Amino acid sequence: MASVPSEKVRMPTPVKLLIAGGFGVGKTTMVGAVSEIRPLRTEEVLTDRSVGVDDLSGVEKKTTTTVAMDFGRISVGDDYVLYLFGTPGQERFWFVWDELARGALGAVVLADTRRLSDCFPSVDYFERRGTPFVVAVNCFEGAPTYDLAEVKLALSLPPDIPVLLCDARRRASGKEVLIALMQHAYSKRPVAKV
Amino acid sequence: MNPDEQLFDEQVVRPYVISRGRTEARANLDLISLAVAIRQPTGLEVGLDPEHLAIVKMCHRPLSVAEVAAALDLPAGTVRVLLGDLLDAGFVAVQDPQPEVDVLDERMYRAVLDGLRAL
């Protein structure tokens, strides 16, 4: 592709990370907490028609769902800019996932211990695709707390997949998760064939 | 609301009209491909629509396809077509993402990790 920037313009290289997980688990919250820009998003308010399509049990307070991509940006030094994309929460948007996952360096799968099974499709998807991922358990108030080893067991994750607790609302917490993801992705990077 | 958003708020023109019916951009731009303006239009160019001019204006610093699409409230596909025009005409330069198959770059991981730690 003929898209070489002229020498005068120094441009950072864009890098993509994904935030995935079930509906209402806090993906948009996490993107917003760590992004340097107001997260850009396209959201569609759930109408009566989606009742019965979207399972709202356990997340009664949430009234909207993200049906398109929402994303934020983190500039890291002069050379790289991270784009964080929250994946659409429902499985009927798999086609958007494929578009998003292409070229992604890694993914955070957000989990809610009240509805742990909601993150199974994301875990399966990234495992199958070979995208490096970590699981971050968002600590909702009133949600049962589990030992991380129990969560790992419940998700039947391979032992090398990092599982950590987080608070998706807090920037420092989101930062920790992204650092864990980058370290994991680094350890999983394709090794050059000699 | 910033003026750029205001300008295109009323979606009376269909996206495919803005791209003159074209749905495939010549350049295969990723959602996170960055565009930056390298030449300012004089206003006398033929074939540049207000959307083209708006993109050149907002890309005084590098912006991704996704950011341009969000700011103009246009589908990413339409923005790809418009950016392809601007690329061909030499108004913008584009930086593509780190290719997935080429994630061997140890320097990149280190720079991103250092950058995240410094936040």
Image (cartoon, coloured by chain):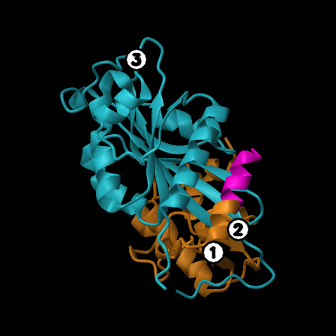
Chain colours: A cyan, B orange
- Quick one: SS at disc 3? loop
Mark 1 lies on residue: B95
Residue that badge 2 annotates: A12
The residue drawn where x is 64% and y is 43% is A35
Q: Which residues are magenta?
A: B111-119
Residue denoted by label 3 = A61
**How many discs appear?**
3
Pair 2/3: label in front: 2
Sequence-wise first label, 2 or 3: 2
Which residue is rendered at x = 29% and y = 32% of the image?
A154
2 and 1 marks on the same chain: no
| Residue B110 on image: x %, y % | 68, 61
Q: Nearer the viewer, residue A124 or A97?
A: A124
Secondary element under disc 2, as helix, strand or loop, is loop
Mark 2, other Cα within 10 Å: few <14 / some 14–19 / many ≥20:
some
Confirm whether residue A96 shows in the render: no
Taking the spot 27% from the left edge, 19% from the top edge, the residue there is: A57
CA distance separating discs 1 and 3:
41 Å
Q: Position of residue B71 (x, y in %)?
A: 60, 53
Tell me, yes or no, whether the two marked residues, 2 and 3, touch with CB atoms within 8 Å: no
Label 1: few (<14), some or many (≥20) within 10 Å? many
Marks 2 and 1, how far apart at CA: 8 Å
Question: Pointer 2 and pointer 1: residues touching (CB < 8 Å)?
Answer: yes
Instruction: Compare residues B32 and B89 and report the one nearer the observer.
Output: B32
Which secondary structure lies at badge 1?
strand
Q: Is residue A41 magenta?
A: no
In the depicted view, which residue is nearer to us: B116 or A45? B116
* Chain bearing mark 3: A
- Subunit of mark 2? A
Disc 2 from disc 3: Cα separation = 40 Å
